[in-house]
Image (tube, rainbow, N blue to C red):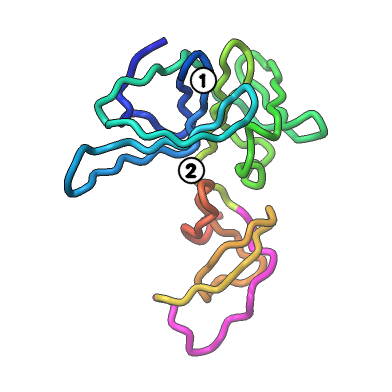
Amino acid sequence: MVKVIASSLRKGNVVDKDGKLYVVLFAENIHPGKGTPVTQLDMRRISDGVKVSERYRTTEQVERAYVEEREHTFLYSDGEGFHFMNPESYDQVAVPESVIGEMAPYLIEGMAVQVSQHNGVPISLVLPQRATFEVVETEPVTKGQTASSSYKPATLSNGVRTLVPPHISAGTRVVVMTADGAYVERAKD
């Protein structure tokens, strides 16, 4: 176990609290005008999936668990979970759906992700920041709409709904953020 200050924790980190392991789902440093700055952590207990919310002073020490982080390639998903392969050793690991959570629609076959394991058990994964998907359905372009401020709803090939600029039509490939599905740009390919 390594003690780190609370403000250094990020999404995907694993902490040891009262002998139980928690994976950080969301971390935010809050600096109020008056008072002590705090770090707000939303975490999921690895053993049973219970979500908890904790606040620490930003300088407070938190125990970070030793976790092995390795790059893996996403292969496929089935009833057992999501299957990943270590490109160096060709070992495969099945990650349960409870660990993947809302990241599942953003997984693309062949995508390189960071899989974190504690004692050989997969506990969290980190996707690349951006992924490319095709727009399957969107409203037609309306004449006279300015591209600067108005966005229109669109459904991507992974089933996620997002907002895209008016010039984007069905069949266009777009780059989105994997954290929230927000439109970044039209794909260069």
In this orientation, which residue lies closer to the viewer: 10 or 20? 20
Q: What residue sits 51% from the left and 34% below the top?
A: 52
Q: Secondary structure at mark 1?
A: strand
Amino acid at dot 2 = Gln
Q: Quadrant of residue 160?
A: bottom right
For the C terminus, the quadrant is bottom right
Spatial separation of the CA atoms under disc 2 and disc 1: 17 Å
Amino acid at dot 1 = Glu
Q: Main secondary structure of the magenta part?
A: loop
Residue 20 x %, y % = 53, 17
Say which mark, if any, is on residue 94: none
Q: What residue sits 48% from the left and 43% below the top?
A: 129
Location of mark 1 (residue)? 69
Location of mark 2 (residue)? 129
Q: Is residue 43 above or below residue 136?
A: above
Q: Residues within 10 Å of mark 2 (few under 14, many from 20)?
A: few
Task: Find the magenta span and give its range.
Answer: 133-148
Q: Is residue 57 above or below residue 64?
A: below
Q: Is residue 138 above or below residue 53?
A: below
In this orientation, which residue lies closer to the viewer: 94 or 9? 9
Is 40 left, or right, of 92 in this rendering? left
Residue 108 x %, y % = 66, 42
Q: What residue sits 62% from the left and 61% below the top?
A: 161
In this orientation, which residue lies closer to the viewer: 55 or 22? 55
